[in-house]
Image (cartoon, coloured by chain):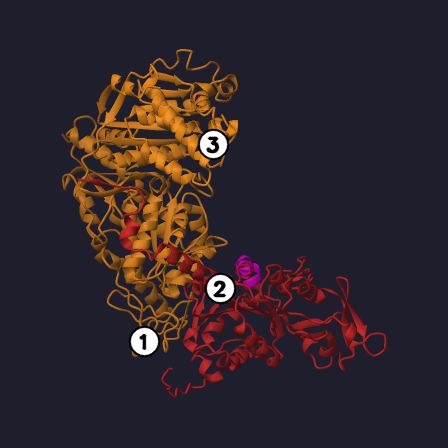
Amino acid sequence: MEDSIDVKEVKLTAKDFASDQDVRWCPGCGDYSILAQVQRTFPDIGVKKENIVWVSGIGCSSRFPYYMSTYGFHGIHGRAPAIATGLKVARPDLSVWVATGDGDLLSIGGNHFIHACRKNVDLKILLFNNRIYGLTKGQYSPTSEKGKITKSTPFGSVDYPFNPISLALGAEATFVARTIDREPKHMQEMIKRAAAHKGIAFIEVFQNCNIFNDGAYELLTDKETKADNVVILEHNKPLVFGKEGNKGIKLDGFKPVVVDLTDGKYSVNDLWVHDEHDESPARAFILSQFTEIPNMPTPIGVFRAIIKETYDAGVEDQIKRITEKKGKGDLKSLLYSGNTWEVN
Amino acid sequence: MEKEKTTEKEIQNLNEVTVRFAGDSGDGMQLTGTQFSDTTALFGNDLGTLPDYPAEIRAPAGTLYGVSGFQVHFSSEDIHTPGDTPDVLVAMNPAALKINLKDLKPNGMIIANTDSFDMKNLKMAGYDSNPLEDGSLSNYKVFPVPITSLTSNALKESTLSTKEITRCKNFFALGLTYWLFNRPIEPTLEWIKDKFSKRPELVEANSTALKAGYYFGDSTEIFTTRYQVEPAHLPKGTYRNISGNEAIALGFVAASLKSNLPLFLGSYPITPASDILHYLSTYKNYGVKTFQAEDEIAGITAAIGAAYGGSLAITTTSGPGMALKTEAMGLAVMTELPVVIINIQRGGPSTGLPTKTEQADLFQAVFGRNGEAPIPVLATSTPSDCFYMAIEAARIAIKYMTPVILLSDGYIANGSEPWRLPKPEEIADIPVKFVKDKEGFAPYNRNEYLARPWAVPGTPGLEHRIGGLEKAHITGNVSYDPENHEFMVRLRARKVQNVQNDIPDLTVIGEQEGELLVLGWGGTYGAITEAVKKAQKDGLKVSQAHLKYLFPMPKNTKDVLKRFKKILIPELNLGQLATIIRAQFLVEPISLTKIKGLPFKTSEVYNKIKEIFGGNNGR
């Protein structure tokens, strides 16, 4: 029996996670909401402040670490997942978070992103997706829609955009979710879920840039339109949306179909029941493609949450096993190994 | 085969011999050369090696561009190079003969695999007639040996396929060479047993081929003499044969043990650096973490992340990979984290000559970053020196909280030499102090070496933010203040310059002042050393100094340079060190340059020295 010591954990608050630095985002930026939700949820994620590290790349989003009173590393363009991977592999005891934007993560950092997903490094990646380059003042980004008119595409972009959720699922990330800057409660829930996940956790946050791409997600955030344009993913629940829950989604083979629940033809029992623990990413991928189909609602919530061994745990485990087998190495045996001979 | 015949052959004593094995890239010449070197090292000779192979994994058989060679120089005396001109050439096919003949010593020995000298191979090598028969090799001692068919004969009982049997011919050639130079075959028999333990039929076949080659030398009439090179009089101690890349790997594991920091390697495979990743990957029970990254940039940035977390972090690469790491090196400068960047130089620019050596990344190491981004630059000089310079690079990185660049090159990396092993207690500890105390902590405070504190995540109360943006002095907050920027630029420069206080003086071998100083850096050490020794024996007043610290240079460098009338700088580039020396010390060195993907021959440096003295000057 351990001695019973009465330890009163000091309960931290959102304020304890705010640093002494002035926040310098443009007034009205969606980043403020993300910062606020992170600060609000972090007292509850069960990790001590000193064991949390925020790593970032370059962009408006990437100033995030300066505003958190945890450990922070503001890196270089696109490389946050790689810096974070090195840190997490070296220090599996830390909770390592990445704050990044659509340009940072999906353009210059695309390579690191897919490999962090593939390896299932235990990182939490928050993608602030505003579909525009903010800090470089308004060029189109890898998530900008085709035809987008910006400073670098005055006649419209001819690029096809990345779908970040599809990309993460394609790279077989073990936790994939989406939320919206204007949905604080939902975002808090997603952050908590990501924090609790063992392995890579990717959250796409639809985030408004009111300077260069204002209203990009208006349909999903406007009180009048959002119910008909957003479907909330919940594990084991049928896909129901619409103002009065009057619409549902049914899966016809690989094809999702919107059905009316009021005309008596279909009931909730006919609908697609979401399973976030499905080992195969195939259905989650179909969900992620809703945004590509006209009139389909945009899913928010957890697309996928499965458990498999993390990269960092694999590294630790291998070291443990080899050390048990060979014994802990010492300098003498290191130097004097192989074919040696004596000269007298 | 009658073993007792051995005694009938004459044994001739030699001081030193250079043997070159050459064949197709599929003939196993690198393996043959390595085995010969290891056995020769165990036998007690001093030695130097030069592997020389094409970048293609297996170029079409018989082609000139597919020739792979391995040269071993061994001696009963102290030597420093793989030898200028081979005494013996083992040529497995006409192409190997054609490519290598020009280097062979006059009257040198050629052991040729006659089976491969057929019309097809001769044509492919560009021979109109068979050089073994047309008298064109009359200046050499030619020993035609049907190596392939003798191997097949020896293995006629084997269950292996014809193709597999033919592949054993390199062991026959190795056995024959062992006999010729009176080396034991047992170490290789052991090696074969270990290497092919999962395929007993290969153990059997390769062992038989090796023995058959050995006994062939004994029983055939064509060899009347065998040669003996007595063990060298090396200093007392325990030795092992070591290549530069293996020594670097051992050096960083040693630095990890001596600093009590876990070793983290972030790396992307690239020739000729990959072997370091391979070696370190086997040291898991030393707590070594190797991260094979998705690209070079991830390799170094992961290392930076690991350094931030409190590891001894390193990244290994070669020229093109170094170029990709450039931006991240600047980040390490700004965040003042200890990361060692190891560049095993190869021929450039761009992809250049992947398997060939060069020293042309010096400018890149010293200057190649945006902004004022000073990084200490160290260079290794020999394979065994790699061990000590790795530890030194780690020591400086940790003590000064700075990235450090360690330069090696393909020649040192793949070459090997006997190394007298240090006793573990002879290697100094590397003190490390992680800050724990909240009191007076600021992320950009400085100690007496101007190093900032290493405060690793997980330490309560020291939460702070670092990054690539300019830092305010002491607080480490982001700062665009013009005064602060200039202050910080100068501070970082001063910090790196201070490393000068902590490194050994440049030593002069030979007269301390005089006519000519041959100043070298990196892998040219061996050729310069032998050339200078030879010139000194001629009575020339020539001295040698070798720079292992390229930035900053030892404090006495200027003083040393001023004591000599002339400075000769041999380099495998267009004169990069010469340019830096001229700029830094306002002296006018003579440049000796070579950019052929090959190391200097002793004679090339020696001839230049003679030329400078212009006859009898300086005697």
Q: Which residues are magenta?
A: A105-116
Of the pair B302 and B321, the residue shown nearer to us: B302
Q: Is residue B85 visible?
A: no
> Do discs 3 and 2 belong to a common subunit?
no
**Vertical placement of B38 versus A195: above or below?**
above
**Vertical placement of B443 versus B197: above or below?**
below
Q: Kindly identify the amino acid type of the residue bearing the numbered disc 1.
A: Phe
Q: Earlier in the sequence, mark 1 or mark 3?
A: 3
Q: What hue does chain B carry in this figure? A: orange
The residue under label 3 is B26
Q: Quadrant of the N terminus of chain B?
A: top left
The residue under label 1 is B441
Other-residue count near label 1 (Cα within 10 Å), few / some / many at <14 / 14–19 / ≥20: some
- Residue B11, given in percent of the width and then of the height, sits at 24, 20
Local SS, label 1: loop
What's the distance in space between the residues labelled 1 and 3, CA to CA? Answer: 61 Å
Chain letter behind tag 1: B
Q: Given contact means CB atoms under 8 Å apart, are the residues at marks 1 and 3 in contact?
A: no
Q: Kindly identify the amino acid type of the residue bearing the numbered disc 3.
A: Gly
Of badges 3 and 2, nearer the viewer stands 3
The residue under label 2 is A80
Q: Which chain is red?
A: A
Of the pair B88 and B159, the residue shown nearer to us: B159
Q: Is residue A107 magenta?
A: yes
Compared across the picture, whether B353 is left or right of A194 comes to left
Other-residue count near label 3 (Cα within 10 Å), few / some / many at <14 / 14–19 / ≥20: some
- Residue B227, given in percent of the width and then of the height, sits at 26, 23
